[in-house]
Image (spheres, rainbow, N blue to C red):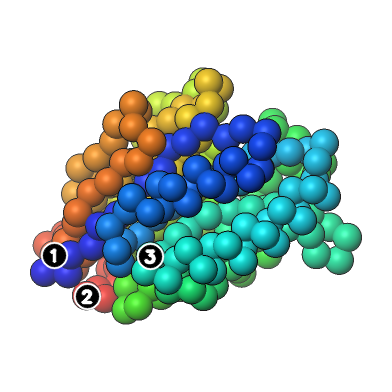
Amino acid sequence: MISKMLYALQVKIGTDFEFNLKKVLTLLDQCQEDSIICTPEVVFSGFAYQRMEEAAEFSKIATQTLLEATKNHTLITTMIEKNHQHFFNNLKVFHKGEIVHKQSKNKLFALGDEQLHFCAGSEDEIAPFYIDSIKCAALNCFELRFIDLWKRVQGADIIFVPAQWGKQRKDQFEALCKALAIANQSFVVASDGANDTMAKGSSVITPYGVVYKNDKKECVQAQVDLRETSKMRKYIQTGIQINL
């Protein structure tokens, strides 16, 4: 048995960047040591289109703070960052005080005008990474809809989905996350915002399709046995790599 506590945060995002960061840090302190936590997309600023420069500057502060705060945890989050005069929605993995993976959002959500404010990252950045010996991968919100990207994360034992998914499409978010877990025979940790316009639906989903969620909580958690991915892949053989 390879036991791991997984958390999916489900928090409201306000206009006070510092308050948003403190909220995440407070929840992080409540999480079990050596656990893995996924936050909603752009949790520290929201899509602050009128304050992009400020958001990018604050992301520098958030990054330094999280490097200190994740000495005993792993945190998957996204933040607005600026590179060569262009803004990106960057997913970052903080693990034991280091950034072990980074990818820029490749699929921008036109309905939310993301393409007007962000540059798209390279699809090549959507690739597996390791948390200790655990093979992981991530899709950033809208990327969840693209089946070709599912192939890029195939073989991971845990797939993280930070999101700001609208409540009008709540059923689609939950269905896609569950299908991702079943099709890839992996755990999925999906984290959505809790603002009034958001779907919530943060969850931890097993390779069997069992869903742990509670829309009333700020932190959804599940203690899981990561070897369930290997058991499922051996039992129902679809050609997905066995890692554990």
Residue 134 in sight here? yes
Q: Which residue is drawn at 68% across and 33% down?
A: 15
Tag 1: amino acid: Lys
Provide the residue designation for mark 2.
Answer: 244
Image spot of residue 167 (x, y percent):
50, 23
Mark 2: few/some/many CA within 10 Å (<14, 14-19, 20+): some
Mark 1 vs mark 2, foreground winner is: 2
> Disc number at residue 73?
3
> Disc number at residue 118?
none
Mark 3 vs mark 1, foreground winner is: 3
Image spot of residue 97 (x, y percent):
48, 73
- Cα separation, mark 3 vs mark 1, equals 26 Å
Contact between marks 3 and 1 (CB within 8 A): the answer is no
Image spot of residue 80 (x, y percent):
70, 52
> Disc number at residue 231?
1
Q: Work out whether mark 1 precedes mark 2 in sequence or the reverse, and give the earlier one.
A: 1
Q: Work out whether mark 3 precedes mark 2 in sequence or the reverse, and give the earlier one.
A: 3
> Mark 2: which secondary structure?
loop
Tag 2: amino acid: Leu
